[in-house]
Amino acid sequence: MSDKRAQIGVIGAGAWGTALAQMLSSDGRDVLIWARDNAVVTEINETHSNTAYLPEARLADTIQATSSIALLADCTIVLVVTPAQKMGEVLAAMPHFPRDIVLCSKGIEAGSFRLMNQVARSLAPDSDIAVLSGPTFAHEVVAGMPTAVTLACGGGTTQWDRLSEAIARPAFRPYYSDDLTGAEIGGAVKNVLAIACGVVEGLQLGQNARAALIARGYAEMMRFGESLGADRDTLSGLCGLGDLVLTCSSTSSRNFSLGKALGEGRTPADLMKDRRTVAEGAFTAPVLRDLAGQHNVAMPITEAVCRLLEGGAARDLAGDLLARPLKSEGPSA
C-alpha cells in the first residue's frame, strides 16, 4: 500500500465498517480494513466484495483486508467499528502509539457503564479520541448518497483539522463538535428508542403513535444526556435528533427491524439467536436503564423496551406508556 497520505485503518468489516472504508477510498486513498472472519478478508481482497454485509457493493481496489490487527500499527488514523461490547477487547489487542482513534460504535459498556470514549481513553491514553455519529445507513453511504455526521474531537480543533481533511468527501460532510459525551449518548439512546418505534410498526398502531414515541423518546434522551453532562445543542443535532428520526422510521435500521418483528409476535431469543448483524439497542437497553437509575433519570420507554426484551408482551409496551400519569410536556417530564 502506498504512503502518499495518512494511512487509514478500519476495525470491523460489518456493513458500517465496510461502508466507511468504501467512502474513505472514494478519492483513491488506501484503506486497510480488519475483519475477524477470514472468509470476509479473502472475499474483500480477491473479489472486492462483502456479500455477507453489503451484497450489492463493489469495493474499491485500494481497500485491503486483514485478519491480523497487528498490521494496523502503521495506520495514523483508525476508525473503530466493532460492536460496542467488543470494543474494549479489540482495542486492547491493537498496537498502540499516538494516533487518531475515531469511535464509530454506539453503545455503553455493560458492567462498567462506561461510554466508548472512556473505554478507549483507558486503553489508548496516548491517542486522541474522536466520535463519529449521525444519521447514517450503510447502504446509502456506500452508494455515495449525501450524508452529514457529527465528528466530536477530544483533541479539539487541532484534531478536527487532521480528521476533517482525511474523512470529509463531497457526499460525506462532518460537522465539528467537542462534546464526545453528547455524541455518544445520542447514538446509544436512539438505538433503544428505535426498537420501541419498531414495535409500534409491528403492532400497526399508526403514524401518530410513532411520532409521539419519537418526541417523548427525544425527551428521554435529553434528560439522560444532561444528567451526564452532554450539551443540549449536541443532542438536538445530527448525532441526537437527526439519528433518532432516521432509525425510528425505517426497516433499514436493525434496531427498528428488531422491534417490528417483536411487535409481530416473534420472541427475543429467536430474533437474536441467528442475527449476523448486531442490533446494538438490545444490548444497550438494560445498561441504559441501570445507568439512568443511578442518576435518578426517568426513562419509561427504555424501561418498557427492557421488559419486552426480557420476555414481556409487545402490547404491554404501548399499554404501559399510555397508562402513565398525565403531566406537562417537556424534557424534564
Image: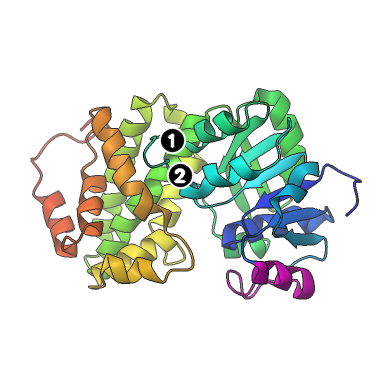
> What residue is pinned by disc 2?
187
Q: CA distance from mark 2 to mark 1?
A: 9 Å
Sequence-wise, the earlier of marks 2 and 1 is: 2
**What colouring method underlies this structural image?**
rainbow
In this rendering, is residue 308 above or below 233? Answer: below
Within 10 Å of disc 1 (Cα), the crowding (few <14, some 14-19, many 20+) is many
- Relative height, residue 179 to residue 214 (above, below): above
In the image: residue 223, left or right of residue 62 = left
Q: Quadrant of the N terminus?
A: bottom right
As helix, strand or loop, the secondary structure at mark 2 comes to helix
Position of residue 327 measured from the top left corner of the image (x, y, whole percent): 12, 36
Please tell me in which quadrant of the rendered image residue 261 appears: bottom left
Question: Tag 2: residue type?
Answer: Gly
Q: Which residues are magenta?
A: 38-58
- In percent of width and height, residue 273 lies at 37, 69
x, y percent for residue 277: 48, 64
- Residue under label 1: 235
* Residue 48 on the magenta span: yes
Residue 9: which disc?
Answer: none
